[in-house]
Amino acid sequence: MNGARAVIETLVASGVEVCFTNPGTSEMHFVAALDEVPEMRAVLGLFEGAVTGAADGYGRLAGHPAVTLLHLGPGLGNGIANLHNARRAHTPVVNIVGDHATTHLPFDPLLASDIESLARPVSAWFRKSTSAEALAADAAQAVAAAYGPPGGVATLVAPADLSWTEVGAPAPPVAPRAREVVTSNAVEATAKALRSEAPAALLLGGTAVREKGLVAARRVSQVTGAKLLCETFPSNLERGAGLPSVERLGYLAELAIGQLQGLRHLVLVDAAAPVSFFAYPNLPGYLVPDGCELHVLAGASDDASGALEALAEALGATARGGGFGVTDAAGGSGGENMQAAQRPERPSGALNTETAAAAIGALLPEGAIVSDEANTCGVFLPSATAAAPRHDWLCLTGGAIGQGIPVATGAAIACPDRKVLSLEADGSAMYTFQALWTQAREGLDVTTVVFNNGSYAILEWELSRVGAGTAGPKAKEMLELNSPDLDFVALARGMGVPATRATDAQELTAQLERALAEPGPALVEAVLRG
């Protein structure tokens, strides 16, 4: 077998089952090998940003990596924005990036580039193979590195001549490291701070916002009065009826400052100390209040949910409550105080951000996966869906827009038995709209709602917040998405996805209900004006 087939067989033996790709000449031996290794599912994307975003969505739900197959430095470069998001989410992703043959590269051919410099900023692990014999073993190492912990993007560069050279056999899998068990000293130090009864909060992120971590954190909160917060953009937040609710830290610095105000202890659980997304005149960038002590209970490589359970036990917080006499929101002193099931009424009247959120909350299916890139149109979504049936909520972890539709695509491949709802702002939808074509080709069960307000609304906010003054005619033109208006129904149909347009709340509710009831991809354009 050649080096390319040895790599594909090694990936399959290591638990990698899906290859998202937009290949070129340097990857043709890998493309041919896909027919020789039927266990590897191959999924074509029309743009590398759709490929890398799909791998991110797949890894967040599957818990193990997909592989991307990318063409040289320019192909990797086209996918970097969504690799940035995957890196921030610690999503397991393996990139195989083809390169010119080692004998051809000294000629400086047209597509030659510094792949390493492109890959390093978005990769937790990087290697360029130097021999055909090492190529498959390097792929096994890449998979182990992607698993982590903490997990992340692993990039392997494969020169073309290594992929066509004959080799002996695939490489055996490499076992990934286990997550670290948090020390009893760290648990006791945190427990001591929370026993002080000074105002405190737990800031959860990463693996701590799944059911096991949320339940343990709620036990800690009930016996100590500590506030429960989570990162602004968690990679995969499990939420809905029957689970403890957790308040997401606000995107706007002013809101986050209010949420953290008065704290004397802030416990980080697989989360970083909060900072503002950008610098603003007369606002702090570091959001931890003066006089507040930070405590790191668990880092990104630790067993965060296990650490929270150990903390709950150290505080005497049993599953039925007990502790320091702090009452729960219902006035009792025990129980987990889980979110009670409740939905908004089906909305009527004008279609705006509030009625759109109510429609989604009224219809969200049990077990749904929500890929959220609604941006400014999503301000009412958290409250409208908090008590909906249980679901997973995937956020824009790195802030690089163009994530939502590709992440939904990968999530649908990871979980074909679950409905995926993609909530997408109009501006960011245009970055990777090509992913709809992949949804149509693969028959994926994804319903996309595009919130069309005809502008980069978040930049309209930011223009004033950074002190740049009032927008003049030229500045307004840079923030408006009109002249011509975007027609998302026509665009979606051109990609092979059935689509409709809603202009009031009743239309959105009816169209969304129909789309969710039918298998396969669909798109609803929600026209928001005023």
Image (cartoon, rainbow, N blue to C red):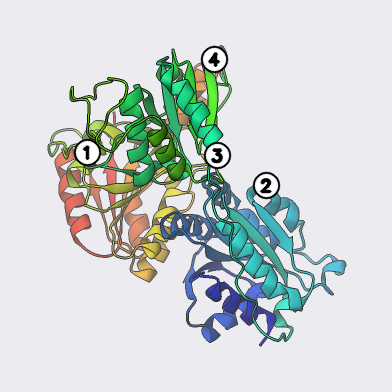
Secondary structure category for the residue under label 2: helix
Split into 4 quadrants, where in the image is the N terminus? bottom right
Amino acid carrying mark 2 in the image: Pro
Q: Which mark is residue 121?
A: 2
Q: Is residue 200 shown above or below 23?
A: above
Amino acid carrying mark 3 in the image: Thr
Pointer 1 or 4: first along the chain: 4
Q: Residue 197: horizontal and vertical position, in percent?
A: 40, 16
The answer for how far apart the CA atoms under marks 1 and 3 are is 35 Å
Going 43% across and 41% down the picture, which residue do you hit?
208
Q: Which mark is residue 387?
A: 1
The residue identified by callout 3 is 183
Q: Residue 308: horizontal and vertical position, in percent?
A: 42, 38
In the rendered image, is residue 472 in sight? Answer: no
Going 40% across and 20% down the picture, which residue do you hit?
259
Split into 4 quadrants, where in the image is the C terminus? top left
Secondary structure category for the residue under label 1: loop
Q: Nearer the viewer, mark 4 or mark 3?
A: 3
Query: In the image, 200: left or right of 37?
Result: left
Q: Which mark is residue 283?
A: 4
Front-most of residues 480 and 234: 234
Front-most of residues 214 and 40: 214
The answer for how far apart the CA atoms under marks 4 and 3 are is 37 Å
Pointer 1 or 3: first along the chain: 3
Q: Residues within 10 Å of mark 3 (few under 14, many from 20)?
A: few
Going 43% across and 60% down the picture, which residue do you hit?
62
